[in-house]
Image: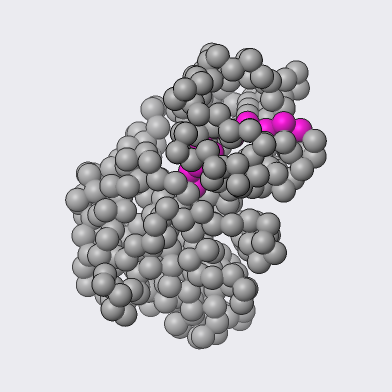
Amino acid sequence: MRAAVIDRYGPPEVVRVAEVPTPEPGPREVRVRVDASSVTVADARIRAARFPAGLGLFARLAFGVRAPRRAILGSTFAGVVDAAGPDVVRFQPGDRVCGMAGSRMGTHAELAVVAESATVPLPADVSAPDAAGMLFGGTTALFFLRDQARVRAGESVLVVGASGAVGTNAVQLARHLGARVTGVTRAANTDLVRGLGAERVIDYEQSPLSALADRFDVVIDTVGILHPSDRRRLLTEGGRLALVAGSLRDLLGVRGQVVGGAAPERTADVTELLALVAGGDLVCVTDRTVTLDDIVDAHRRVDSGRKVGNIVLTPAARSGGDA
């Protein structure tokens, strides 16, 4: 099978498409024909060994000291079960499924082996690209807004980085939870963010957050651009700050009004998000859809910082439209 392979840390050009052995599922695993995955900021960080300040050593111990321990990246998947291990009880070949692969990764490939416990049915009215594109940002936004910051109806929420994979989901989910949303993004993305449910959109290049006089019940920084001196200043009394991206120093400061940490990959959250997509309450914002042959350009786009929403990868397709 074909897969995007990384043998060493480095720029986007270290990613190459290669023929690799077809993986075999273990007793409680399924092999999925990956109709769609996504290329995320997490994939790009691992590829480049570009980890948050203070976390480089810990990250290399987790992902590989001199090269990525997992040569095939990719954490989200949506597709069709190709084979099932002997102890799998919930799925069989031909079932449409999706989910998140966890630390095993491996979904930037035509076939991926994932745990049965990490897999959920893909509803008939949700497309594979929408499911795979939404999951990384959706699960992160849901965890920080609902579980960490505990957003309540009527509260005001500031989403910093409102046009990214996490941000586009955060705007929609905060609105779904009944909050009044202000989004922070570039001018070019203003209409998009407003269309997702933000009552107000701030162009941070023209209106720096350091000059913002408003206060919010919840501030969620999805990209780590909020200056430390502005974090608590932007909060109401009793307000909460959710740090999706941050340094080791930021994580050590997580207490009281500040929440952070890594979002878990829970199938219950995946199922909830899929229901919102099926009901039209959540949309997957797609920057572009690419094939494995375009994987280097996809990583370049992520590195540019200009990605809007999600980059969806369709491993089974070929450039030029050939299957």
Residue 200 spot, x, y in % from top left: 63, 33
**Circle count:** 0
Q: Is residue 263 visible?
A: no
Is 312 or 146 nearer to us in this picture?
312
Residue 200 within the segment the image draws in magenta:
no
Q: What residue lies at 49% left-to-right and 62% top-to-bottom?
A: 132
- Image-quadrant location for residue 111: bottom left
Image quarter where the N terminus lies is bottom left
Q: Is residue 207 visible?
A: yes
Residue 161 within the segment the image draws in magenta:
yes
- Image-quadrant location for residue 180: top right
Q: What residue lies at 68% left-to-right and 20% top-to-bottom?
A: 215
Residue 224 spot, x, y in % from top left: 47, 30
Image quarter where the C terminus lies is bottom left
Q: Is residue 57 above or below residue 168?
A: above
Q: Is residue 250 above or below residue 267?
A: above
Q: What residue lies at 48% left-to-right and 74% top-to-bottom?
A: 79
187 vs 305, left or right, is: right
Q: Is residue 185 above or below residue 205?
A: below
Is 1 or 234 nearer to us in this picture?
234
Residue 94 spot, x, y in % from top left: 51, 85
Q: What residue lies at 31% left-to-right and 53% top-to-bottom?
A: 298
Is 198 or 274 nearer to us in this picture?
198
- Image-quadrant location for residue 205: top left
**In this picture, which residue range is highlighted in magenta?**
155-166
Residue 220 spot, x, y in % from top left: 60, 33
Colour scheme in use: one colour
